[in-house]
Image (cartoon, helix red, strand yellow):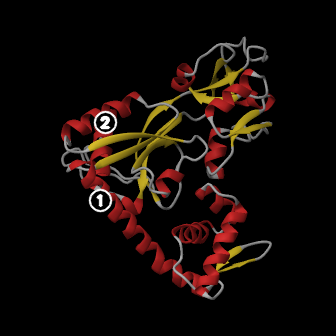
Amino acid sequence: MGTPETRELEAFLALAEELHFGRAGERLYVSQSRVSQLLRTLEHRVGARLVERTSRRVRLTPLGEQLYRGLRPAFDAINTTLDDVRAVAAGGGGLLRIGFQGTVNTDVMEAMALFQKEHPDCATELVEIAFSDPFGPLLRREVDTAVVLMPAEESELVVGQVFSAQPQALAVSPRHPFAARDGLSAEELAACPLISVRGAAPEYWRRAQAPDTTPEGLAIPVGPTVATLQEGLALVRADRGSLLLCHPTADYYGRSGVTFVPVTGLPDSLLGLVWHRGHETARVRGFAQALATVTGRLRDTPRRVSRNRVAYSYEDGVRR
């Protein structure tokens, strides 16, 4: 029947982990029908069904479960070997690819400088991550670690340093009734359609950036959806909706046609350093330590902060 192609195996792994054709397609940046086509081709090569699907659910067959159990570690081993070869090609200390969303935080730049000082043989590379896909590049091994907007609840990911707590502001057009205000409460968002994110971002993450209710439970109108921050700001300028942003991002993107109004009563916006649980390296740990040092959040004793979080001891910098 021939040897399966890499794309067929990637589609199967994504579907096995998402159990949803649409989400698997978003993860691979292909259509749902393309995922179906790749799966059919792989099943034809294998000679049996790997996935059972009904109108209500998708699940692996026993043979599909067996294939996934054997394929996932083998696929990871191949990628690890490729990364090791790239590291050698990059020169001795290897290469650390750091993802970021929107803008590079000052703390991150200082952490990179500290990391380079302590690891002079390791090259660093900044890779911009799509606003609509905060975790995809980590899952696809396009970056080694990433600084993304919180929260991050994916079981495959570890959340290291959480930092840069910032109050939020509402981006509105100068024609909006809120534009002349010095500030507003979170409850007043009930009168303001919020622009939200579409794409591969998990639903819980999208709701965190554009909540559907106020803290007291009032419904917030749903505005247009966008894939990039620039798209969102363009819709704000056109008075098509409003956008919640942290103050530093609002300052960075401050421009004519957009007014930023402080909002009280919402949780602070937070950034977090995240990496894949199965792809952790000494370089990733070294950068996590550098960021923890720069942000001044080290503790005298280790502590566990959540299921996916890790903490550091000040004395030895060892991950706990």
Q: State the image coordinates of residue 3 (x, y, percent, origin top left).
A: 51, 79
Vertical side of 85 occupied by 264: above or below = above
Residue denoted by label 2: 112
Vertical side of 193 occupied by 67: above or below = below
Outermost residue toward the top? 180
Taking 8 as reference, is 194 left or right? right
* Disc number lying in front (1 or 2): 1
The number of numbered discs placed on residues in the rendered structure image is 2
Q: State the image coordinates of residue 313 (x, y, percent, origin top left).
A: 25, 48
Q: Amino acid at mark 1?
A: Val
Quadrant housing the C terminus? bottom left
Quadrant of the image occupied by residue 147: top left
Circle 1 packing at 10 Å, graded few (<14), some (14-19), many (20+), is few
Residue denoted by label 1: 85
Q: State the image coordinates of residue 56 (x, y, percent, origin top left).
A: 78, 72
> Can residue 299 be spotted in the picture?
no
